[in-house]
């Protein structure tokens, strides 16, 4: 995003490497994240030779892809100056509702399992738009603090999930859903990764190349200025929260395929992890900042960290501690970068 | 003080031959300044001349790259902000550092509360604040929450707060920018008293009358260099302008002659829900600059908001080119061809942490030249932005730089660039030159007249009397939410505007009813 101005570059003689100030300028532009990613790879590869094996790289991509979708969803609301704590509860609700729909469709048309998969996806979008509309109403129309709104809707979605599921998982999902979408491959590439790539591209185009994207950054950066510039802040916020919830629902649907059953407790770790990855990736909690490239890198970092710590046989409790420390570190580095 | 010299014996804080740069950009080059006891030192310079950086060095917020800093004659390496404050060096900047949800008294003692054991001595602190206010003649309710105060009141509190403790140095950055006439007088009285008590005062301003009213000596910065330093006595405006801009300015106010056309915008008996406007009527023609004057609180700022759909109206209506329009949001106003440039640039006009080019192109991306089917035409936008930045001479000329990194005057240029980015019929400027240096101001006036000659209707809402009188074809004066008079031709004088503003009776032949 930070592109140097062509005019000032042309005016200056083609600069040679000028030592420390160049490193500083480069650091100010890209931040500490690429260095951290490389550092993490080096440390884990040194700690366990299998870390860089093909199997493990495929494994990492399968682990990271769900977080990637949710973190990009989170990025949208972070740019708009808010955040969404309800993404996890949303995923669980989607998991149960879409599973119930798929099981019912499979019972009605056992011969065409793909029809059930498609019906499940439609249900997913329905859940996403409905949950998103609720958040959008609270944040965009009523202008309540997003922390309170999404905390409240988390409780609502969790309750709805437990009512719908009666606390038990939903089995008997269509085979192609589990074996193709959940754990299928094209060559060496997981199918779920292939499904995710167009989503990532669409989000990139939306935020960086459309009028809506500009409105989004302006709204998050200074809502009053956005209003005076003729931007409908209510509309922008409403669309953003609905998009975020819909993307979280899609991630919940894909993750259901991966775990092969509808799970009422799915996605509990996603709110913290998605915010962590997005903030490490350059989103600011004050709004108006963040881009797809950075968030992708942030997701890679968080995923590598979790995978690498698994391989070093660190327990999950210590991993939680480390993730929290990393989040705080990321916020401090963000401040260094901007000052 | 000149480079290489030692500070005077009564120096509070001094810089000698300092350099300061960011990256490859040098902001201060070999600058020296000495703040001495009992002296009001005026600091002048255009926006971006390095004034803020200089202040940053004095309060220990930045460290100089080269040169030395003396605190009470003692050379200090690496002054820290806490150290500067302990030594009595305080700065009152334009960005307030008050806690809005706390009371006046709590803010006064913020960070230096008096305690007995671990408990606050609330009663003693409160009565101490009352004493201090009484001494200085400041009338503020010590129990009021800061967010309930007006901006000038907050400003006053900020200044009084910086005065705690023994005499030291105080740095004031354009303190009168938001003050009314009476408040300004009060502030001047406080400053004079401080000087007599032995304070060293650094006063940053763009207003020449303040230089004369208060100053003992002047330092002028230009492009990061100290270009002049002399006593105020015997100073002429011409000399000062020449030193600030580096060349003499032939005429400060441009020739405004233009052909007026049809009525473009009318406000008809507008009353706003918040009571700020009671019965406001005015009209602006194409090719005409219409000024709106009045005291702070007269409702003149609300006229702009009402015309731009930012105010809930209880009565009256708006007409654009003779058609009654229901404008209830800025986007509708923009659709009607109205552009509004708010006074509070940082709060209302700019997305501060976004790059300059995005801030300028907010309007352009709404046209088919800027975006096709919602997708941005980035190359086209960028060349348009570069052209606008060049024509307004925005500095630094870097469209990728975040808006918050520009100086105040250049931020205003970004807002103006946006307003010019798309041709409109009606422009509403609200205090366009508040906090703007001379060079930028002249440039802005030229743009204003150019717009008007191209056939735009311009509404100029301003507290600067000279500007109001010299740039408007007609002037409306407001008082308590009403138009109390309309001045044309020879009647457009500062005296007349002032008289109407204060509700004093006027010579009858000069007061006319605002015609419908």
Image (tube, rainbow, N blue to C red):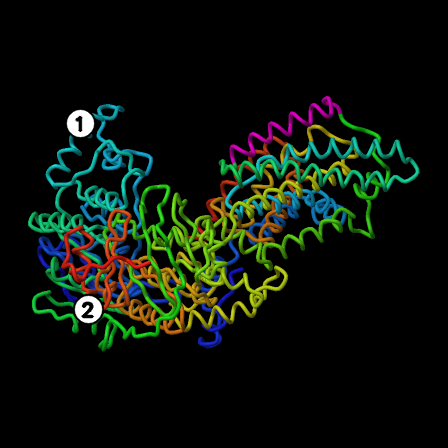
Q: Main secondary structure of the magenta part?
A: helix
Q: CA distance from mark 2 to mark 1?
A: 58 Å
Relative height, residue A223 to residue B100 (above, below) = below
Taking the image as shown, residue B233 lies to the left or right of residue B69, namely left
The secondary structure type at the circle numbered 2 is helix
Which residue is at the front of the view, B358 or B92? Answer: B358
Please tell me the numbered disc located at residue B490: 2
Taking the image as shown, residue A136 lies to the left or right of residue B119, namely right
Taking the image as shown, residue A114 lies to the left or right of residue B398, namely right
- Residue segment shown in magenta: A147-168
Picture coordinates of residue B130 (x, y %)? 16, 33
Is residue B173 among what the camera can see?
no
Relative height, residue A149 to residue B242 (above, below) = above
Mark 2 is surrounded, within 10 Å at the Cα level, by few (under 14), some (14 to 19) or many (20 or more) other residues, namely few
Residue hosting label 1: B124
Mark 2 vs mark 1: which is more N-terminal? 1
């Amino acid at each position: 995003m930070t592109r140097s101005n062509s005019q000032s570059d042309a005016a200056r003689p083609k600069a040679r490497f000028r030592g420390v100030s160049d490193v500083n300028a480069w650091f100010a532009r890209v931040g500490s994240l690429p260095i951290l990613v490389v550092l993490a790879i080096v440390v884990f590869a040194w700690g366990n030779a299998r870390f860089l094996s093909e199997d493990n790289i495929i494994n990492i991509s399968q682990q990271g892809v769900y977080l990637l979708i949710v973190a990009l969803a989170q990025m949208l609301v972070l740019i708009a100056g808010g955040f969404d704590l309800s993404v996890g509860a949303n995923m669980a609700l989607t998991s149960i509702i879409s599973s119930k729909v798929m099981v019912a469709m499979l019972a009605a048309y056992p011969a065409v399992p793909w029809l059930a998969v498609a019906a499940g996806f439609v249900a997913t979008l329905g859940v996403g738009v409905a949950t998103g509309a609720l958040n959008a109403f609270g944040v965009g129309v009523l202008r309540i603090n997003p922390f309170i709104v999404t905390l409240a809707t988390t409780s609502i979605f969790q309750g709805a999930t437990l009512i719908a599921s009666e606390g038990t998982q939903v089995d008997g999902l269509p085979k192609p859903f589990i074996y193709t979408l959940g754990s299928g491959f094209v060559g060496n590439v997981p199918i779920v990764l292939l499904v995710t790539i167009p989503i990532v591209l669409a989000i990139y185009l939306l935020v960086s190349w459309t009028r809506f994207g500009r409105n989004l950054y302006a709204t998050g950066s200074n809502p009053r200025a956005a209003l005076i510039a003729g931007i409908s802040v209510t509309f922008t916020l409403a669309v953003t929260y609905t998009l975020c919830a819909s993307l979280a629902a899609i991630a919940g649907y894909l993750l259901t395929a991966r775990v092969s059953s509808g799970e009422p407790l799915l996605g509990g770790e996603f709110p913290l992890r998605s915010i962590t990855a997005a903030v490490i990736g350059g989103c600011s909690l004050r709004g108006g900042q963040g881009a797809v490239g950075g968030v992708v890198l942030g997701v890679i970092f968080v995923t590598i960290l979790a995978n690498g710590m698994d391989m070093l046989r660190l327990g999950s409790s210590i991993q939680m501690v480390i993730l929290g420390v990393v989040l705080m570190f990321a916020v401090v580095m963000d401040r260094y970068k901007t000052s | 003080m000149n480079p290489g010299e030692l500070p005077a014996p009564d120096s509070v804080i001094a810089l000698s031959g300092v350099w300061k740069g960011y990256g490859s950009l040098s902001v201060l080059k070999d600058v020296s300044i000495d703040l001495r006891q009992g002296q009001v030192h005026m600091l002048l310079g255009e926006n971006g001349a390095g004034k803020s950086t200089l202040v940053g060095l004095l309060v220990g917020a930045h460290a100089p790259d080269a040169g030395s800093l003396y605190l009470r004659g003692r050379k200090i390496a690496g002054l820290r902000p806490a150290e500067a404050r302990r030594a009595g060096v305080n700065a009152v900047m334009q960005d307030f550092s008050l806690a809005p949800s706390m009371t006046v008294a709590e803010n006064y003692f913020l960070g230096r509360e008096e305690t007995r054991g671990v408990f606050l001595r609330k009663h003693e602190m409160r009565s101490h604040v009352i004493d201090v206010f009484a001494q200085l003649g400041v009338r503020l309710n010590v129990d009021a929450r800061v967010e309930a105060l007006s901006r000038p009141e907050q400003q006053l509190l900020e200044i009084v707060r910086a005065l705690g403790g023994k005499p030291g140095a105080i740095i004031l950055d354009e303190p009168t920018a938001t003050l009314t006439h009476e408040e300004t007088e009060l502030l001047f009285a406080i400053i004079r008293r401080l000087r007599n008590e032995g304070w060293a005062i650094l006063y940053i301003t763009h207003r020449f009358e303040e230089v004369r009213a208060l100053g003992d000596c002047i330092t002028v910065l230009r492009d990061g260099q100290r270009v002049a330093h002399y006593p105020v006595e015997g100073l002429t405006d011409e000399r000062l302008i020449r030193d600030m801009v580096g060349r003499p300015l032939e005429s400060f106010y441009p020739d405004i002659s233009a052909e007026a056309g049809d009525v473009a915008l009318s406000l008809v008996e507008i009353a706003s829900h918040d009571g700020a406007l009671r019965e406001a009527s005015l009209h602006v023609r194409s090719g005409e600059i219409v000024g709106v004057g009045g005291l702070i609180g007269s409702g003149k700022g609300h006229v702009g908001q009402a015309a731009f759909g930012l105010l809930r109206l209880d009565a009256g209506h708006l007409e654009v080119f003779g058609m009654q329009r229901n404008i209830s949001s800025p986007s509708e106003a923009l659709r009607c061809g109205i552009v509004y440039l708010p006074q509070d640039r940082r709060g209302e006009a700019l997305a501060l942490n976004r790059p300059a080019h995005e801030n300028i192109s907010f309007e352009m991306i709404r046209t088919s030249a800027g975006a096709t089917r919602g997708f941005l035409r980035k190359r086209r936008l960028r060349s348009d932005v570069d052209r606008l930045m060049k024509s307004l001479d925005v500095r630094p000329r870097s469209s990728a730089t975040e808006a918050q990194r520009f100086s105040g005057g250049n931020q205003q240029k970004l807002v103006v660039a946006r307003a010019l980015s798309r041709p409109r019929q009606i422009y509403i400027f609200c205090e366009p030159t508040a906090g703007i240096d001379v060079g930028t101001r002249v440039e802005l006036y030229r743009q204003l007249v150019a717009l008007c000659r191209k056939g735009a209707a311009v509404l100029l809402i301003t507290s600067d009397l000279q500007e109001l009188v010299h740039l408007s074809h007609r002037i409306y004066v407001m008082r308590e939410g009403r138009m109390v008079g309309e001045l044309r031709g020879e009647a457009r004088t500062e005296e007349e505007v002032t008289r109407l503003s204060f509700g004093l009776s006027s010579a009858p032949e000069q007061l006319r009813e605002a015609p419908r």
